[in-house]
Image (tube, rainbow, N blue to C red):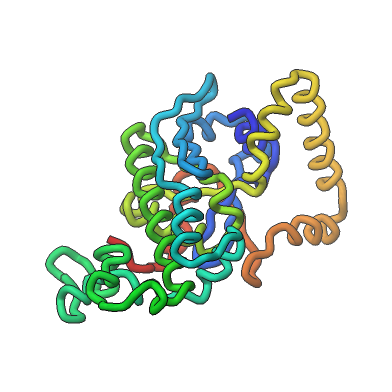
């Protein structure tokens, strides 16, 4: 938790939302500060399993989790596809069509929406449920389709649990981190959509620029002297950037803010600003 708190309180553009391939930075209202607007928040760490931590100014508490996490995706994907490398699995999912293995609402209702309850025909009714309807074997299915279905199934379920936990504890900020995310655009898009869907637009998923270093940074900061040196170093870098000419500074900052060919914008911790972003893409979700 010390690593996450340090990054969020010290680095101006550490946190961001991710919608339709666009990275929007979320910054404190007054820039670098120990703002009360940050706490409390929910940190969802997706490693082999998932730990859900409530963090406030005075400490933290593990308030939830699930054994269905990144290890679940990796293990099942390896068994079903033969792929062994995690990044290779993520790359493979980009070419997938999960409707080839997932049962959709349209498969149940003759290709029609289930309008009475607001479900479109493309909504996932059962992950991997279409396989039950077919007579083929594993070799008949495309690895990319299987990988994408797994990725969506696990991302949706983690997001659902995280959203319910946040609402139970009255938290407005959810940060997702851990090895499972790895800056993967589709994973972040899926999580962002699911949180927006399950919260009915009341919450937004947020991610961290340096999420892969939270544990190492937290351990380093246990040393008080190292903590003080780290804060001074980061803030001196920030001060140096502010003294640069506008164009030079913009070039340096802008180089960190490119995503999918578009420049990111910044938002504040204020809930009104957080909810002003355009609606995320709408993949099928039940």
Residue 60 is left or right of residue 9, and the answer is left
Check the image and report above or below for 126 versus 201: below
Looking at this view, is 66 or 44 the one in front? 66
> Which residue is found at the position 42% from the left and 40% from the top?
172
* Residue 177 point in image, percent of width and height: 55, 45
- Position of residue 184 measured from the top left corner of the image (x, y, whole percent): 57, 60
Q: Is residue 24 left or right of residue 114?
A: right
Q: Position of residue 187 (x, y in %)?
A: 50, 59
Residue 43 visible in the current orientation: yes
* Nearer the observer, 79 or 26: 79
Q: Is residue 195 left or right of residue 117?
A: right
Q: Is residue 238 left or right of residue 2?
A: right
Query: Could you say which quadrant of the image residue 237 lies in?
Result: top right
Q: How many marks?
A: 0
Q: Quadrant of the N terminus?
A: top right
Q: Residue at x 48, y 73 (%)?
A: 144
Q: From what the image shows, is residue 35 above or below residue 206?
A: above
Residue 286: percent from left, percent from top: 27, 60
Can you see residue 99? no
Point 40% across, 48% down: residue: 158
At horizontal 16% and vertical 80% (from top left) the residue drawn is: 110
């Amino acid at each position: 938790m010390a690593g996450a708190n340090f990054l969020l309180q010290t680095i101006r553009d550490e946190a961001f939302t991710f919608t339709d391939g666009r990275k929007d930075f979320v910054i404190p209202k007054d820039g670098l500060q120990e703002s009360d607007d940050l706490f409390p928040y929910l940190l969802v760490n997706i490693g082999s399993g998932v730990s859900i931590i409530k963090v406030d100014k005075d400490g933290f508490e593990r308030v939830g989790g699930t054994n269905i996490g990144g290890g679940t995706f990796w293990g099942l994907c390896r068994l079903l596809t033969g792929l062994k490398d995690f990044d290779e699995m993520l790359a493979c999912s980009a070419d997938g069509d999960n409707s080839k293995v997932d049962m959709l609402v349209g498969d149940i209702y003759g290709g029609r929406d289930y309008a009475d309850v607001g479900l479109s025909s493309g909504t996932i009714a059962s992950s991997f449920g279409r396989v039950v309807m077919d007579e083929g074997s594993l070799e008949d299915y495309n690895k990319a389709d299987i990988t994408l279905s797994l990725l969506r199934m696990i991302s949706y379920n983690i997001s659902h649990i995280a959203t319910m936990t946040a609402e139970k504890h009255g938290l407005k900020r959810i940060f997702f981190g851990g090895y499972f995310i790895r800056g993967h655009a589709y994973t972040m898009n899926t999580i962002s959509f699911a949180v927006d869907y399950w919260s009915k637009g009341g919450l937004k998923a947020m991610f961290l620029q340096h999420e892969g270093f939270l544990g190492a940074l937290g351990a380093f900061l246990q040393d008080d002297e190292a903590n003080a040196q780290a804060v001074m170093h980061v803030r001196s870098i920030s001060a140096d950037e502010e003294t640069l000419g506008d164009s030079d500074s913009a070039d340096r900052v802008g180089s960190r803010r490119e995503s999918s060919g578009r420049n990111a914008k910044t938002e504040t911790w204020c809930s009104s600003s957080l909810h002003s972003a355009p609606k995320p893409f709408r993949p099928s979700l039940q």
